[in-house]
Amino acid sequence: MSPRSERTPLLADSPRNSEESTRAAEEEDAALHGGNAAATLSSSNEHRRGVREVLLFVWAVIATAGVIVLAVILQHRNATSGTPSPISPSDPSAGGPYTATTTTTTTTTTTTTTTTTTNTDTNAGLHSKKRNLIFMVSDGMGPASLSLTRSFRQHVQSLPASDVLTLDAHFWGTSRTRSTNSLVTDSAAGATAFSCGRKSYNGAIAMLDGHRPCGTVLEAAKRKGFRTGLVVTTDVTDATPASFAAHVDVRWQMDEIALHEVGAGPLGRSVDLILGGGRCHFLGNGTRGSCRNDDVDVLGLARDRFGWAFKGDRQGFDELQLGRNATLPLLGLFADADVPFEIDRRNMADVYPSLSEMATTALTVLDEATKHADHGFFLMIEGSRIDHAGHFNDPAAQVREVLEYDKTFKIVLDYLAKSDTEGVLVATSDHETGGLSTAWQAPGEAPVYDWYPAVLAKANASAEHLTRLLNEHVAANPGESEQSLKDWINKELVVGRLGITDALETELAALAADPAGANPVFCRIVSTRAHIGWSTHGHSAVDVNIYSSGGPAAEKIRGNVENTDIGKFLSEYLDVDVDAITKELEGKFAARRGGADATAETKTGAAAEGFALLSGHRPAAQ
């Protein structure tokens, strides 16, 4: 018995191959019948060889004939019918719908009859179902931001390395981000790629090279009957939300953007819900809190002409009951400019709602508004201030922004899982900001293979907020000595708010010497101790991640794609005609300009009352 058999007596020895088994059987048969084994084997082998050759020849003839017949049939079919083979709706290549609540798979067999006159398209009806699309933008969030936040979360919550972010579990691909005039895009060109599915120049708000307008997925969705919404934590007239609902040559035309968003634009009102900051752009410059350059009361216009319900503070937001007590169109402006960073907002929750609260409200309102409608809704949600933390190089603020975005992403996933309406979630970034690196080598020192999330965990305020506190203190104490100011900065801000007890004299002196420019100093104090590196206060050209709830339809944007591919997917998923909106806009802009050169129009500037008020056009509320 072999050693293997001794160790495992109930198991047979390793099986022999079929030829060995056949030979052994023949030898045994010859021995049993008293014959000569060798002679018997030789005769038997020659007989089998002859039979095998005959069978192989017959098989080859039959196979060749079959191929010829099949080729003739296919050639005849192609010559008499232009109908392609149908694609099953369950085939990922069909780009078919995905229902998040589906837990079982059903296979349906479809019989298709092809004739020379009838084209039965089995893809017809793929877009006939009611559907919702939620598109999330993590402004300025690159891959390193995810690594930074993941490790930070694991540290502060004592989690294992395997416990990752919700975003990590829904990674889908990456996106290339360049604009038409730069390898490094800005948010306007990046958002235009999403909204129009077209590349454009930096600064463009749903405009193309040559100052030509492009229709957006939100506008096309509204035209088809979908409800639409925008939720952000920055000014609602900022580049990303503006690129879905406005058309101006440069992003800084925020006064005109505000008018477009409420309905005083070339297409009338296309948005049903807007939640975020930026109240100052909706108030005439004679009103307290206004930042407009004119006296146009956009808020009054929104209410009186376009029927918007308005909420302007935390009390008003709470009255919405997270969407259970709201009507459309709904305009919620909860900050003069940006909603504070989440690291600061959580200590001011009685003043400002969070991104997750606003997103929950929007989902509830839009879901209720479309409950009995033929079409669903399109909602864009932006984690806007991830970008601002990157511009400031503030890692403590950024990780809290990403965590809040991740929380909101999960809320949307949960909504889709519970909804009876088919839907999909797609999330990506317009670009990376800051050139973030989860490593930093101090000048003159050897590299350290580590970074320290504990430093970020100790911080309880952003550099932006600390700079504000410092300037308020200086204004309130005009005669304070430099040493007294440095002592106050160290005790109240550096130790008290950042949890850092080893501030250098040079760092404190820099803060005291230039309070207005303190923001980057505070950020550097935190970053160097955490060993976090930054290469810029601007954007970078790194590819950014794509995340999704998944499903066959989203296969079109799996892998490495252009940002415009994401924009095209949005309109294709909703089956809306963005090109038709573009043609309509081109006609309206041509009439407005009256043949004037587009560049001259840009130089003179758009009138603050917006497209509709400029031309005397008064579109009715929709």
Image: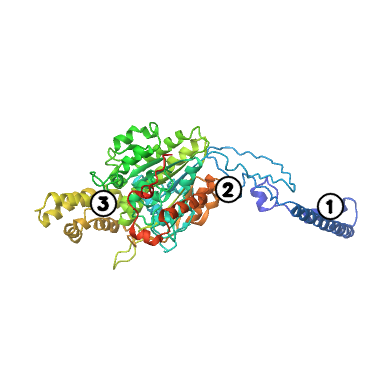
Q: How is the image coloured?
A: rainbow
> What is the CA distance from the residue labelled 2 to the residue labelled 3?
45 Å
| Number of numbered discs | 3
Label 3 belongs to which residue?
464
Q: Is there any visible trace of residue 592 in the rendered image?
A: yes
**In x, y percent, where is residue 259?**
36, 46
Q: Residue furthest bottom?
A: 444
Up/down of 366 relative to 46, above or below? above
> What is the CA distance from the residue labelled 2 to the residue labelled 1?
62 Å
**In x, y percent, where is residue 517?**
22, 58
Q: Amino acid at mark 1?
A: Glu
Residue 189 is left or right of residue 89, and the answer is left
Q: Pick whichever of labels 3 and 1 is earlier in the sequence.
A: 1
Q: Amino acid at mark 3?
A: Glu
Res 28 label: 1
> What is the CA distance from the residue labelled 3 to the residue labelled 1?
92 Å
Q: Counting other residues with Cα less than 10 Å from the Cα at mark 3, is it few (<14), some (14-19), or many (20 or more)?
A: many
Q: Amino acid at mark 2?
A: Gly
Q: Nearer the viewer, mark 3 or mark 1?
A: 3
Q: Counting other residues with Cα less than 10 Å from the Cα at mark 2, is it few (<14), some (14-19), or many (20 or more)?
A: many
- Which of the two residues, 498 or 356, is positioned nearer the viewer here? 356
User: What's the residue at 91%, 55% (across, down)?
Assistant: 35
- Which of the two residues, 299 or 18, is positioned nearer the viewer here? 299
Q: Nearer the viewer, mark 2 or mark 3?
A: 2
Q: Secondary structure at mark 3?
A: helix
Q: Secondary structure at mark 2?
A: loop
Label 2 belongs to which residue?
95
**In x, y percent, where is residue 236?**
35, 47
Q: Nearer the viewer, mark 2 or mark 1?
A: 2
Q: Counting other residues with Cα less than 10 Å from the Cα at mark 1, is it few (<14), some (14-19), or many (20 or more)?
A: few
Q: Secondary structure at mark 1?
A: helix
User: What's the residue at 42%, 64% (across, down)?
Assistant: 181
